[in-house]
Image: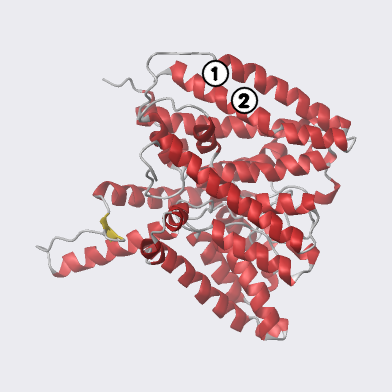
Amino acid sequence: MNLIVILNYLGNIMRIEGAAMLPGLLISLFKHEYHTAYAFFLTIIFLAAFGSLFASFRTKQKEISHREGFFIVGVSWILLSIFGAAPLFLSGEKQLASFLDCFFEIVSGFTTTGASILTEIEALPMGLLYWRSFTHWLGGMGILVFMLAIMPSSGTGGSIKILRAESPGPLVGKLVPKMRNTAKILYMMYIALTVLEVIFLLCGGMPLFDSLLHTFGTAGTGGFSIKNDSIAAYDSAYIDGVIGVFMLLFGVNFNVYYLLLTRNFAAAISNSEILTYFGIVGASVGAITLNTLKLFGGVGKAFRYSFFQVASIITTTGFATGDFDKWPEFSRCLLVMLMIIGACAGSTGGGIKVARLIILYKSMRNSVQKMLHPKSVKVIKMDGAVVENRVVAEINAFMLLYVVIFLLSCLVVSLDNFNYDTTVTSVIACLNNIGPGLGLVGPTGNYSMLSDLSKLVLSADMLLGRLEIFPLIMMFTPMMWKRSR
């Protein structure tokens, strides 16, 4: 592997992370949170110094291979989480006395999971609250995609290889011929939707700081709130509706927004993944509304809470307006299923992704048909385009690894001897980047009571889920380290 190019990328990533911490530093100074400000200052200086050193390395060979792209993405996300946890640890907060807890919290932030070890969120300094939520926004679209958008491309094929390694979904491509322009377009749409949500929340009476941080959580489909009771603390149907709608919008494949911007309305409206996504949402909201009618005492209230929670869970955001762990068993089971399904490919959401499930279904259907008609030739199509056999094979491999990782993680977490709901849904929530699960890790609980081993495993699950397994798995395979011939 080309070590110089890798160090150059890592250096730029460190500098971007340092710059992203500056608002947290300024907020801490403005609010006289001097211990927190000092923690940010030390971290920023370190990132700026070593980032500039690594970024200064130059080589004529700027093109990177596929394995270098996967390696850069995997290492970048691990380093981002380690350095991102530093301000929390150095702040001296009692809730953040363990570096592993700080690492868990920031991994949860960057991977847009929203699982937290904090027992008193509102007691945290405002500077740390900002940084904690802003990691959602950075991690949602991808910090490497952000780097590609603001910095010159390192090579013709390097950018697309990094995008494919970091972006969620089985099918990743360019919106326009130049990869850097694709990254810019993605972030322009991302920023536009972010600003729009902030405006809507301000119109609903939510304070500016609260509006900004909850928008970060919505945009990244992360779910960190600055309130102990999450969105329920505002007790506003308007705020519930705004956040619910925007969660669904951020769960949509951003390629569809590009189709709308280029006035290709027919392709956008007929997109099979979008139709399936909103079909699942509509059916789930209807089913849970009916199932919770007695609990809420009326259709209006049942619909309000059902719509918000379905939007939050299928987009893997994790915000809550109530304790859905106390809902009827049917509703709880359906929400767990939505956790696994997840949002659309190419969105900021987690989970398996709707596109993968569509392709798996079509692959299964073709296999059954070939059993009946062995000589028939069948191809899988998505929106008129043929899905390559390579993509189908990758999806099958992804699903196998997903199941293996899930089962092994459940076994490790079960050593803590908590109940079944807590053990299984904590893994589902972290591997699919949801945040809250059921039982002790439900919407009114947190992950603080888990052992260090479980926190470490769940941190790895969050990273595996956000990067969709392959970049991190490849780092530990012999093929990654073999010399190419």
Give the SS element for disc 1: helix
Most extreme residue toward the front, as rendered?
Answer: 263
Quadrant location, the N terminus: top left
Q: Which residue is mark 2?
A: 15
Q: Quadrant of residue 139?
A: top right
Q: Quadrant of residue 425?
A: bottom right
Quadrant location, the C terminus: top left
- From the top left corner, tell me how far across and down residue 162 is, in percent: 43, 34
Instruction: In this rendered view, identify the residue nearer to me: 82 or 17.
Output: 17
**Residue at image coords 30%, 21%:** 484
Left of 284 or right of it: where is 182?
left
Q: Distance between the Cα atoms at labels 2 and 1?
A: 9 Å
**Residue at image coords 59%, 53%:** 193
- From the top left corner, tell me how far across and down residue 12 is, in percent: 56, 24
**Residue at image coords 62%, 63%:** 421
Q: Which residue is mark 1?
A: 55
Give the answer, above or below, for where 186 lies relative to 298. above
Q: Is residue 33 visible?
A: yes
- From the top left corner, tell me how far across and down residue 135 is, in percent: 65, 41
Instruction: In this rendered view, identify the residue nearer to me: 63 or 420.
Output: 63
Instruction: In this rendered view, identify the residue nearer to me: 218 or 97.
Output: 218
Give, as a three-letter code, the residue at label 2: Arg
Q: Quadrant of residue 76?
A: top right
The local crowd at label 2, few if under 14, some if 14 to 19, many if 20 or more residues have their Cα within 10 Å, is many
Instruction: In this rendered view, identify the residue nearer to me: 296 or 175.
Output: 175
